[in-house]
Image (cartoon, rainbow, N blue to C red):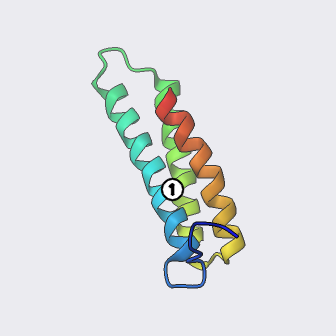
Amino acid sequence: MSDSPDFSGMDGGEEQDAADIVRDVVARYNALLMEEHRRPMQDKELVALLKFKRAEALADQERLAGADPEEAERIAGLYATLLKELKES
C-alpha cells in the first residue's frame, strides 16, 4: 500500500498535477528565451528551438483538458523528466 493518497478520482487529480508540471516547463522555456533575448549576440537557432519546444508544451497543456487519467499521468511523467533536465542545464 502506498503512503501517498490517490487523488486521481477527484477533480483536478492527475490532470491538475500534469498541468502544473507542463506549466512549469513552459515557464522555464519563457525564462530561457528572455535570457537569450538579453544577450548581445542571440543564438537564433536556440531561440527557434526554444519557441518550438514551448509551442509543443502549450499544445500538450491544451490536450490535457480532455485527457484520461492514464494519458495525464504519461504527460506528467514526460514533463517531470523534462523539467528536471531543464533545471539541471
Residue drawn at (38%, 42%) of the image: 30
Q: Nearer the viewer, residue 50 or 88?
A: 88
Mark 1 burial class by Cα count in 10 Å: few <14, some 14-19, many 20+: many
Residue drawn at (40%, 33%) of the image: 32
Residue drawn at (50%, 29%) of the image: 88
Residue 77 pos. (x, y %) = 65, 54
Q: Check the image and report above or below for 5 versus 82.
A: below
> Which quarter of the image is occupied by the N terminus?
bottom right
Disc 1 residue type (three-letter) = Val
* Extreme residue in the top direction: 41
Q: Check the image and report above or below for 5 versus 75.
A: below
Residue drawn at (45%, 61%) of the image: 20
Residue 7 occupies quadrant? bottom right
Q: Nearer the viewer, residue 8 or 5?
A: 5
Residue identified by numbered label 1: 22
Residue 59 occupies quadrant? bottom right
Q: Nearer the viewer, residue 88 or 38?
A: 88
Q: Secondary structure at mark 1?
A: helix
Q: Check the image and report above or below for 45 versus 34.
A: above
* Extreme residue in the bottom direction: 10
